[in-house]
Amino acid sequence: DAKTTQPNSMESNEEEPVHLPCNHSTISGTDYIHWYRQLPSQGPEYVIHGLTSNVNNRMASLAIAEDRKSSTLILHRATLRDAAVYYCILRGYDNYGQNFVFGPGTRLSVLP
Amino acid sequence: DSGVTQTPKHLITATGQRVTLRCSPRSGDLSVYWYQQSLDQGLQFLIQYYNGEERAKGNILERFSAQQFPDLHSELNLSSLELGDSALYFCASSVSSRTGEGGTEAFFGQGTRLTVV
């Protein structure tokens, strides 16, 4: 199974950019890189996903390394509401369920 | 609002009892996933259904079972409950497809908090 490695925790100041790294050295050519986040006492929330090219949406940007063995989730201006656990997950194109497994994620703290 | 509805929001029951948790996926989503999250623990994948059929199984106990109905809603049945089954149970849905799902995002409900006393 393709796995991801993330730092256990990170800290950021409010209104500063945040770069959350994820390593996935065993990624296969058909694996998509997904990011979800979970705020306290809530269900996980989809953030962004991509395959090869960098992606932007209203919530964040996803920068994918050229060799695809790592990626970075970028929050352009952290707010207190961005404090959450962030999960980086690989989802295979032709594999099911077992690829939607969450690791421990990165707990992001945002300081005022 | 993710569009995924889970009921009930809270459930308190005694050890040895049986409960049913319900999940209504987003309109048009064919896949439903179930997860268990114990206090301060990670999300444990339990099981996935796609269009009424079981597609993948994770760390689901034999005392637990699930099904997906023709209208695509899903139920997770937990029986012979133990204190350790107290947890948040989340359901997620995604569009998926017959051949793959890597490029599809999933949307989670707000969970059912189960307390076994």
Image (cartoon, helix red, strand yellow):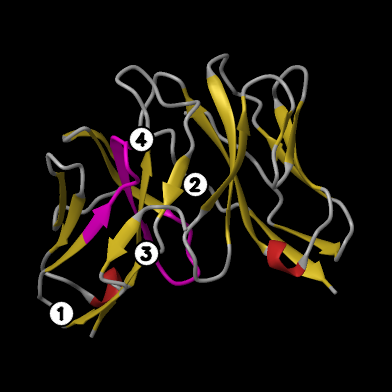
Q: Amino acid at mark 2?
A: Phe
Q: Residue furthest front?
A: B27
Q: Which residues are magenta?
A: B22-43
User: Where, quadrant-wise, is the C terminus of chain B in this rendering?
Assistant: bottom left
B109 vs A83, nearest the viewer: B109
Residue at disc 4, secondary structure: loop
A3 vs A54, nearest the viewer: A54
The x and y percentages for residue A74 are: 78, 44
Q: Residue at x 74, y 17 (%)?
A: A67
**Residue indicated by mark 2:** A102
Could you tell me which chain the residue with mark 4 belongs to?
Answer: A
Q: Residue at x 21, y 59 (%)?
A: B22
- In the displayed structure image, the side of residue B10 where residue B101 appears, left or right: right
Is residue B58 visible in the rendered image? The answer is no
Q: Nearer the viewer, mark 3 or mark 4?
A: 3
Q: Are marks 1 and 4 on the same chain?
A: no
- In the displayed structure image, the side of residue A25 where residue A18 appears, left or right: right
**Residue indicated by mark 3:** B111
The Cα atoms of the two marked residues, 2 and 3, are separated by: 16 Å
Could you tell me which chain the residue with mark 2 belongs to?
Answer: A
Q: Are marks 2 and 3 on the same chain?
A: no
Residue at disc 2, secondary structure: loop
The Cα atoms of the two marked residues, 2 and 1, are separated by: 28 Å
**How many neighbours does mark 3 have within 10 angstroms: few (below 14), some (14-19), or many (20 or more)?**
many
Q: Are marks 2 and 1 on the same chain?
A: no
Q: Amino acid at mark 1?
A: Thr
